[in-house]
Each structure stands twice: as structure tokens, then as C-alpha cells.
């Protein structure tokens, strides 16, 4: 275990203790579905996002877990006031690290299913149910939204090209056709997040998707919508730099998972075919 991994575990453990101390049974006895949101300085955006989330999805009660990734504004206060369970991490490590912690809080809190959405309000909360339904029906373990199959408001030609190029690359590497590899609105069985290896502090979408596919889990896409950000600024930064880093995550994750497959690792305990909702 590297020093970075040790530091992450120390940070996560402290954050989990503070989280459970603050919320008690609300944190340890979650409903079946947990909505996990990573947030960094999303004051003014996070409250409306939480308010718009459905309280039940396909008959399942929901809880919202917000992992504040070193926010220095009122993100935590706003999210808590909106009714979310807030895990306040004092160190800014990246969206990937925040989501990884959120998945752990959801699993250990007893959630059976996890949905992720972003804190910036770009995703349509009414589309969550369409992502959850294939999992409840035993048809999938992991469902991701796709702007390519659905719609997008962005006019940025570089971003649009990047979405399509990365989709082609991951489809070629994994052997499964994927039309949108970076969509943040996703649904999954909670146990999937504990089975795949998640190490990336940032740009985790590719790592998670490749890991899930190479573990043999059933992955499907559903049409979904991405809107323009209405509050604040994107944390992704320059298109070229973002693209290079995302490509690096794709390459390193695929190589790591290929080696694991060659060594006979990474097989799921149960797939959608044997884990459908009773």
C-alpha cells in the first residue's frame, strides 16, 4: 500500500466517523436507494439539485448523500438544510475520491442500490427512474445515461467530439458498445462499487465503467439529457488538458484490468441474472 493510499484511508476513516456520529441511525440504516453526489464549492447549486431529487424511485425510498470534497463555501450547510446527509471532507482530493467515499457510505449504510448525479444541476432528476428500472428487473447491474442517445444543450464542438472519441476508444478496448463514457447520471447495484477497483482521484467515470465491464457485470445505457450549467463554473478546466487526463485514465485502467483478468481476478460474485429484485 502506497503512502497516498494510506493517507486516503486515514482521511476516509475520519470522515466516516464524523458522518456516523453526526447522523446516527440515519447514516447506518439507509433506505434501499442512495443518491450519491460529490460536491466542491457548489453553493447556490447544491440546494436546488437536492430539492429536485425524487423522494421515491420505482417505489423505493431514497436518501441523499453529499460528499463535500474540501469545499470552502456554504456547500455543506446548504446541502444539510436541503435534507441531505453530508460528509464533510476537509481536503480537496477530486471527484473520484469523493464518489468512492460516497459509495462506501452508501454500502456500509445498507443501501442496495446507488444512483450518482452531479452537484451542478446539469442532469434531469426525472430520468433517474428509467435508469433504475433495468436493475430492479434483473436486466442490468449498472446503467448509465447517454447524451448521445438522448440530448445535450452544450454547443462546445470539442466536448462533443471528445464524448464520441472516448466512447469509440472504450468500446474498442472492452468489446462492449458504449455511446457516452462520461455521463454522471448513473445507477448501479451497491455491491458493484465494492467489487471493482477504484483508485483515480479524478476522472473516475472511465475507471468505473471499464472496471464494471471487465468484471463481467451487465451494463446498459438509457437515453438521458444534459443541460447547461446554470450556477457556478465547471471544475473540468481546459478541454485539451481534461482530454489528455481522461485518456490517461482510460489507458491505465484498461491495462490494469487486463492484467487482472489474465491473473484470474475480478469476477463478480453475482450478476444481474442472479441478483434481480425479489
Image (tube, helix red, strand yellow):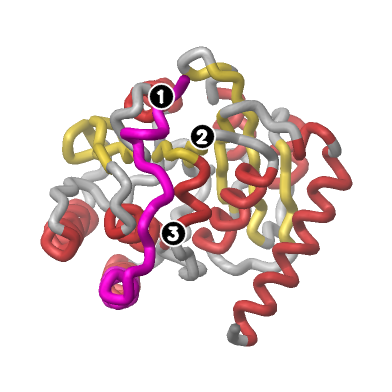
Q: Secondary structure at mark 1?
A: helix
Instruction: Residue at 39%, 57% (x, y): give it.
Output: 208
Residues marked 2 and 1 touching at CB (< 8 Å) = yes
Which one is nearer the viewer's eye here, 224 or 241? 224
Judged left or right of residue 261, residue 20 is right
Residues at circles 2 and 3 in contact by the CB criterion of under 8 Å: no
Residue 108 appears at what percent x and percent y? 67, 46
Instruction: Please provide the residue range marked out in magenta.
Output: 249-278
Kindly report the distance in space between the C-alpha atoms of the residues bearing marks 2 and 1: 9 Å
Where residue 112 sits, quadrant-wise, is top right
Q: Is residue 160 visible?
A: yes
Image point (62%, 39%), residue name: 44
Q: Specify which label sits upstream in the sequence, 2 or 3.
A: 2
Residue 183 is labelled as none
Q: Position of residue 135 (x, y in %)?
A: 38, 30
Disc count in the image?
3
| Residue 233 image offset from top left, x and y in percent | 47, 53
Reading the image, the residue beneath label 1 is: 136
Sequence-wise, the earlier of marks 3 and 1 is 1
- First in sequence, mark 2 or 1: give its number: 2
**To which residue does mark 2 refer?**
113
Task: State whether residue 226 appears in this view.
Answer: no
Give the image quarter of residue 186. top left
Amino acid at each position: 500500500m502506497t503512502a497516498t493510499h494510506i493517507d486516503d484511508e486515514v482521511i476516509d476513516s475520519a470522515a466516516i466517523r464524523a458522518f456516523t456520529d453526526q447522523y446516527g441511525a440515519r447514516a447506518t440504516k439507509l433506505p434501499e436507494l442512495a443518491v450519491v453526489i460529490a460536491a466542491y464549492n457548489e453553493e447556490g447549486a447544491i440546494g436546488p439539485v437536492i430539492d429536485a431529487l425524487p423522494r421515491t424511485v420505482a417505489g423505493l425510498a431514497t436518501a441523499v448523500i453529499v460528499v463535500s470534497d474540501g469545499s470552502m463555501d456554504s456547500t455543506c450547510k446548504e446541502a444539510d438544510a436541503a435534507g441531505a446527509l453530508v460528509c464533510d471532507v476537509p481536503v480537496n482530493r477530486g471527484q473520484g475520491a469523493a464518489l468512492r467515499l460516497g459509495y462506501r457510505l452508501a454500502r456500509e449504510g445498507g443501501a442496495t442500490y446507488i444512483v450518482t448525479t452531479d452537484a451542478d444541476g446539469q442532469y434531469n432528476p426525472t430520468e433517474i427512474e428509467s435508469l433504475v428500472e433495468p436493475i430492479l428487473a434483473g436486466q442490468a447491474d449498472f446503467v448509465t445515461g447517454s447524451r448521445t442517445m438522448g440530448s445535450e444543450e452544450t454547443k462546445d464542438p470539442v466536448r462533443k467530439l471528445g464524448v464520441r472519441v472516448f466512447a469509440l476508444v472504450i468500446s474498442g478496448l472492452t468489446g462492449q458498445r458504449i455511446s457516452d463514457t462520461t455521463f454522471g447520471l448513473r445507477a448501479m447495484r451497491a455491491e458493484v462499487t465494492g467489487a471493482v477497483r477504484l483508485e483515480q482521484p479524478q476522472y473516475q467515470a472511465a475507471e468505473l465503467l471499464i472496471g464494471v465491464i471487465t468484471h463481467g457485470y451487465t451494463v446498459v445505457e438509457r437515453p438521458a439529457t444534459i443541460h447547461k450549467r446554470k450556477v457556478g463554473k465547471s471544475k473540468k478546466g481546459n478541454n485539451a488538458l481534461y482530454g489528455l487526463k481522461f485518456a490517461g485514465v482510460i489507458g491505465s485502467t484498461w491495462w490494469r484490468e487486463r492484467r487482472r483478468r489474465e491473473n484470474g481476478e475480478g469476477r463478480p460474485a453475482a450478476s444481474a441474472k442472479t441478483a434481480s429484485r425479489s
